[in-house]
Amino acid sequence: MDKLVINGGNPLFGSIEINGAKNAAVAILPAAIMASSDICSIDNIPNIEDVHCIERILSSLGCKIKTGRNSVVIDSTDIVSMDANTNDVRKMRASYYLIGALLGRFKEARVELPGGCPIGVRPIDQHIKGFEALGARVEIKHGCVIVKADKLVGTNIFFDVVSVGATINVMLAATLAEGITILENVAKEPHVVDVANFLNSMGANIKGAGTEAIRIVGVKKLKGCSYSVIPDQIEAGTYMIAAAACGGEVLVQNIIPKHLESISAKLIEMGAQIIEDGDSITVKSNGKLKGVNIKTQPYPGFPTDVQQPLSALLTVAEGRSIINESIWESRFKHVDELKKMGANIKVEGRTAIIDGVEKLSGAVVKATDLRAGAAMVIAGLIAEGTTEVLSIEHIDRGYPNIEDKFKALGADIKRVSYSK
């Protein structure tokens, strides 16, 4: 097993390249199987465990996968199975995109119920509502979602809640349905737009992604294409927060600044300097920042995936900060780990009240989930003494080479193998 060992207290200086977006890649790769008898070549793929997991699942279905440095070529001509039931399917949330992709192309799918980070109840009822509205029959048996349709027919679908997963999954299926589908009350996140753009590159007819409604004119088939995934908004936000927390000056490159506006606004409010320049942002900070109030919201609001990393910074910000987590009900599991380091945090339901302390102290902590892991790394970087972060397999799901990137900025961090 591996752990991260961090000696905190070093300011960060230099530049960093952001990888392709995890949340886009794990939807785009399953979408590639919708190109019948053709090949998709996808660039700017992050080298993370969730991507490797999807690649293994696609291989199990019969796809030919060729990987390169930050790229993958998918040939789905000879898919032999519509049954995705490997352990990889069960351990990651994004495997549910296989339902929409297989249903769209083959009009049937059998996919094990997905897993992922334990951050709260994440039902797939809105996915099922969309599939049934398109004409599919859906049942759940023995932990599997079984979906079949004689044909898919476009219709109007209004989601009861804003859901990124449901928006993308139903969009996948509707792409190859007959007629026109209108999706309303949809998610507007950048990766939703990226998946729509990828499908359009394959020959789909999708308009309105990123707005209140998505209009899909069904097509008979999709072709292969070459595509490049957008930069990772969450990875970029994490490094911006780390730079502000540690002090120094960091140039964050290969980004889309507009995607980061809510994060930039909060860091500016705290007292950091944010300088935008084309496809990069420079973060300057003396490490002495003031507390702020945060409420997580769907895009373009403050992203829930950045709440945990920011909470690590707020533990040493001057004054009181209040975080209202409106997306997931169990996204404060990292608080107990921060308390081990001396943080003063009180959780009441979906609200965390943080009173900034002068400093954190190094301790042995664990990553309870992906973004909580990033929070513990940031806490270790700003703490006095040595911090050991365990269970870093969660971190590897979404942050490529995190220790190498921080080391290049001047952090004292290393990956160490150990036995339980």
Image (cartoon, rainbow, N blue to C red):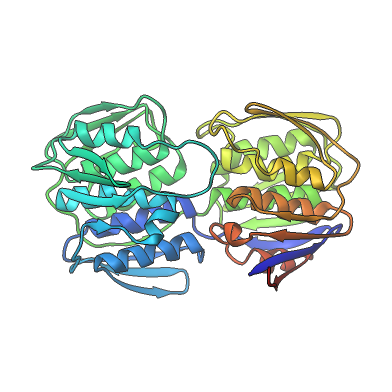
Residue drawn at the location 60% of the way across and 58% of the way down: 395
Q: Position of residue 67 (x, y in %)?
A: 39, 74
Q: Where is residue 324 in the image (x, y as percent from the top left)?
A: 64, 27
Q: In this view, does 1 lie to the left or right of 202?
A: right
Q: Which residue lies furthest to the right in this view?
A: 358
Name the quadrant of the C terminus.
Answer: bottom right
Residue drawn at the location 46% of the way across and 54% of the way down: 230
Residue 297's place in the image compared with 245, above or below, is above
Residue drawn at the location 86% of the way across and 34% of the way down: 318
Q: Residue furthest left?
A: 150
Residue 416's place in the image compared with 101, above or below, is below
- Res. 202 image quadrant: bottom left
Residue drawn at the location 73% of the way across and 42% of the way down: 336
Q: Is residue 143 visible?
A: yes
Q: Where is residue 322 in the image (x, y as percent from the top left)?
A: 73, 28
Q: Is residue 40 visible?
A: no
Name the quadrant of the N terminus.
Answer: bottom right
Q: How many marks?
A: 0
Residue 207's place in the image compared with 213, above or below, is below
Viewer-closest of 231 and 304: 304
Q: Position of residue 326 (x, y in %)?
A: 56, 28
Q: In this view, does 286 lie to the left or right of 167?
A: right
